[in-house]
Amino acid sequence: MKEQTIYSYKLLARFRWRWPGLLLQLGVLLAGLSIFALPAFGVWQVLSSLSVLVVLPVVHYLLFRFSVYAAQEQAKTSPDGLFSVWWGAGTRYPVSLSFYRQAELTVTLGSLLLSTLLFAWFPVSYGITLLVGAVAFSIPRLSALLFTYRQPGHCRVRYEPGSIAFLQTDG
């Protein structure tokens, strides 16, 4: 009862990132590593550089929290949300489309810029792996961001564990 609003929402669309999306991400990651890292370094060095990919979910999470804090929204994190492609992104109530776009753009561009900055400090194989991983891990956010331009400007967005729901109020 505590989290109820006076509005009821109608589901306009839902953007889900399922197995085909995960396979696309894995394909982009493997293709990027085989094109950029594998010819310059050995297989074992590329495999050991995969450990740097653990940094990216943390970066996405922290950038999303920064965006929520800057916009003064109420955010919540659920344990299952930390394992989705949105890595802990979530808000207590549905948010406006403009906030959603701003937050996702902040996370996407911020992770790419931070990966580029860290490239200068890491060994080259780790830097390439980080950049390719940042591009591959940003695909779900960019896809959902592009999907928002098909929705009406007054709709609301709700983060769900495996999807993004676009809602419209009846009032």
Image: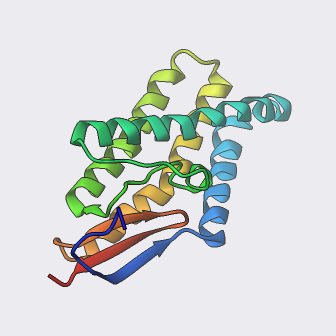
| Quadrant holding the C terminus | bottom left
Q: Is residue 130 left or right of residue 147?
A: right
Where is residue 16 drawn, in percent x and y? 51, 72
As rendered, which of 3 and 106 lies closer to the eye?
3
In depth, the one of 169 and 130 nearer the eye is 169
The quadrant in which the N terminus is found is bottom left
What's the residue at 40%, 32% (across, down)?
Answer: 113
**Taking 162 as reference, is 59 above or below it?**
above
> Which residue is at 54% across, 52% downward?
78
Farthest residue in the right direction?
44
Q: Residue at x 32, y 61 (%)?
A: 93
| Whether residue 31 is situated above or below residue 12 in the rendered picture | above
Nearer-the-camera pick, 170 or 101: 170
Q: Position of residue 167 (x, y in %)?
A: 30, 76
Give residue 125's quadrant in the image: top right
Describe residue 100's horizontal placement relative to residue 164 as left or right.
left
Q: Is residue 108 above or below residue 169?
A: above
- Residue 51 horizontal side relative to residue 86, left or right: right
Residue found at the far front of this picture: 1
Name which residue lies at 49% across and 30% down: 115
Q: Position of residue 15 (x, y in %)?
A: 45, 73
